[in-house]
Amino acid sequence: MSSQNDPSCEPSSSPQDLVHDVLTRFDAYARIRGGRDSIFQATRSTPQQEQRAFDELAQAITLLRGAVE
Protein backbone atom coordinates (compact mmCIF):
# COMPACT_ATOMS: atom_id res chain seq x y z
CA MET A 1 0.00 0.00 0.00
CA SER A 2 1.40 3.36 -0.91
CA SER A 3 1.61 6.24 1.53
CA GLN A 4 -0.74 8.16 -0.77
CA ASN A 5 -3.58 5.80 0.20
CA ASP A 6 -2.55 5.45 3.84
CA PRO A 7 -4.13 8.15 6.03
CA SER A 8 -1.80 7.24 8.93
CA CYS A 9 1.08 8.62 6.85
CA GLU A 10 -0.51 12.04 6.45
CA PRO A 11 0.56 14.92 8.67
CA SER A 12 -1.88 16.08 11.33
CA SER A 13 -5.09 17.11 9.63
CA SER A 14 -7.93 19.25 10.81
CA PRO A 15 -11.18 17.50 11.72
CA GLN A 16 -12.71 19.04 8.59
CA ASP A 17 -9.99 17.46 6.42
CA LEU A 18 -10.53 14.13 8.16
CA VAL A 19 -14.30 14.31 7.57
CA HIS A 20 -13.63 15.02 3.90
CA ASP A 21 -11.30 12.00 3.78
CA VAL A 22 -13.95 9.75 5.36
CA LEU A 23 -16.59 10.91 2.89
CA THR A 24 -14.24 10.40 -0.06
CA ARG A 25 -13.36 6.90 1.09
CA PHE A 26 -17.02 6.08 1.75
CA ASP A 27 -17.90 7.14 -1.80
CA ALA A 28 -15.10 4.92 -3.16
CA TYR A 29 -16.24 1.97 -1.05
CA ALA A 30 -19.88 2.41 -2.12
CA ARG A 31 -18.86 2.58 -5.78
CA ILE A 32 -16.69 -0.55 -5.52
CA ARG A 33 -19.33 -2.42 -3.54
CA GLY A 34 -21.96 -1.46 -6.11
CA GLY A 35 -19.73 -2.89 -8.83
CA ARG A 36 -19.59 -6.24 -7.13
CA ASP A 37 -22.56 -7.63 -9.05
CA SER A 38 -22.36 -5.44 -12.13
CA ILE A 39 -23.47 -6.98 -15.39
CA PHE A 40 -20.61 -5.15 -17.11
CA GLN A 41 -17.29 -6.95 -16.81
CA ALA A 42 -15.29 -3.71 -16.94
CA THR A 43 -17.01 -2.26 -13.86
CA ARG A 44 -17.07 -5.46 -11.82
CA SER A 45 -14.98 -5.30 -8.65
CA THR A 46 -13.10 -8.07 -6.91
CA PRO A 47 -13.51 -9.07 -3.26
CA GLN A 48 -9.94 -7.84 -2.71
CA GLN A 49 -10.78 -4.37 -4.06
CA GLU A 50 -13.86 -4.23 -1.85
CA GLN A 51 -11.89 -5.30 1.24
CA ARG A 52 -9.12 -2.77 0.56
CA ALA A 53 -11.67 0.04 0.17
CA PHE A 54 -13.41 -1.02 3.39
CA ASP A 55 -10.11 -1.18 5.30
CA GLU A 56 -9.15 2.31 4.09
CA LEU A 57 -12.57 3.64 5.11
CA ALA A 58 -12.28 2.05 8.56
CA GLN A 59 -8.80 3.53 9.01
CA ALA A 60 -10.03 7.02 8.04
CA ILE A 61 -12.90 6.71 10.53
CA THR A 62 -10.47 5.70 13.26
CA LEU A 63 -8.31 8.76 12.56
CA LEU A 64 -11.36 11.02 12.65
CA ARG A 65 -12.53 9.55 15.94
CA GLY A 66 -9.08 10.07 17.43
CA ALA A 67 -9.08 13.70 16.32
CA VAL A 68 -12.44 14.58 17.86
CA GLU A 69 -12.02 12.74 21.17
Image (cartoon, rainbow, N blue to C red):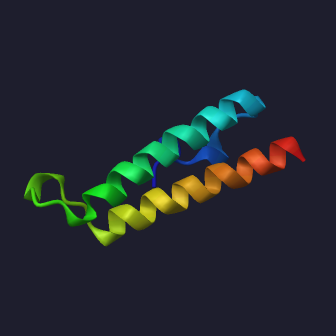
* Residue 9 figure quarter: top right
Q: Nearer the viewer, residue 38 or 56?
A: 38
User: What residue lies at 63% left-to-right and 56% top-to-bottom?
Assistant: 59
Q: Quick check: 55 left or right of 18?
A: left
Q: Residue at x 74, y 45 (%)?
A: 64
Residue lying at the far bottom of the rendered structure: 47
Q: Position of residue 23 (x, y in %)?
A: 56, 39
Above/below status of 55 relative to 18:
below
In the image, residue 54 above or below residue 7: below
Q: Taking the image as drawn, is residue 61 in sight?
A: yes
User: Can you say whether 23 is above or below 8 in the image?
Assistant: above
The x, y position of residue 10, in whole percent, is 65, 38
Above or below, 45 against 8 in this view is below
| Residue 21 placement (x, y as % from top left) | 59, 37
Q: Residue at x 50, y 38 (%)?
A: 24
Relative to residue 11, is residue 49 drawn left or right?
left
**Residue at 55% across / 53% down in the picture?**
57
In the rendered image, the quadrant that contains the N terminus is bottom left
- Count of labels shown? 0
Instruction: Determine the image quadrant of residue 13.
Output: top right
* Residue 13 in view in this figure: no
28 sits to left or right of 12 = left
Task: Name the side, left or right, on which 59 lies relative to 51.
Answer: right
Image coordinates for residue 33, horizontal then vertical, percent: 35, 59
